[in-house]
Image (cartoon, helix red, strand yellow):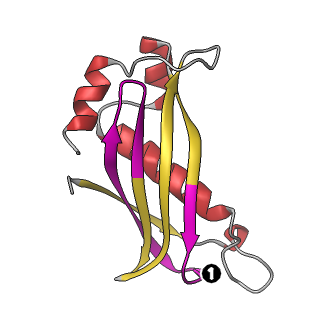
Amino acid sequence: MGKEFTFKVKVYYEDTDAGGIVYYANYLKFLERARSEAIYLLGFSNKKLLDEFGSLIIVKSCNIKYFKPAKLEEVLNVISNIKIITQTSFIMNQIIKRNDETITEAEVHLVVVNSEGRPIKIPNIFESKLKEYL
């Protein structure tokens, strides 16, 4: 396994249901924030990819497994790894942990598309940065 990106997220009231448990769809937001930060750590941003390369990164699919609930005011770590890179897409494994305990796992297939939503080749400079984390 290659290098990993780690992103901390604190669970706020808005993330939870009436019982103080993170609402299941909000884990997707945590994963998205972690991916955006990973892209930023590579020297890019979604805006930069759009402005300079005419490309957007979209989620093609997400397979998520929930093991344990996260609760109000807990601090979680989202650990992201790049698993596979193709000409037009890449797959990230993302794990959400509370301390050393895995509470959620996801495999996210991301595709690079143009402004019309058609898959395009990953920009070379971005692809080379992604490969550093394989």
Q: Give the percent coordinates (x, y) of residue 86.
A: 35, 31
In this rendering, is residue 109 above or below 67?
A: above
Residue neighbourhood size for the residue with mark 1, other residues' Cα within 10 Å, grouped as few (<14), some (14–19), many (≥20): some
80 magenta-colored: yes
Quadrant that contains the N terminus: bottom left
Q: Secondary structure at mark 1?
A: loop
- Residue sitting at x 52%, y 80%: 74
Q: Give the percent coordinates (x, y) of residue 28.
A: 60, 57
Quadrant that contains the C terminus: top left
Q: Give the percent coordinates (x, y) of residue 130.
A: 28, 36
Amino acid tagged 1 = Leu
Q: Residue furthest right?
A: 18
Residue 96 found in image quarter: bottom left
In this rendering, is residue 37 above or below 17?
A: above
In this view, the residue in front, 102 or 20, is 102
Q: Is residue 26 left or right of residue 90?
A: right
Dominant secondary structure (helix, strand or loop) of the stretch shown in magenta: strand
- Residue sitting at x 50%, y 32%: 111
Q: Give the percent coordinates (x, y) of residue 41.
A: 31, 42
- Residue sitting at x 55%, y 16%: 114
Q: Which residues are magenta?
A: 63-92
Mark 1, residue position? 72
In this rendering, is residue 81 above or below 131?
A: below
In this view, the residue in front, 58 or 88, is 88
Q: Is residue 13 left or right of residue 64?
A: right
In this view, the residue in front, 49 or 117, is 117
Q: How many marks?
A: 1
66 magenta-colored: yes
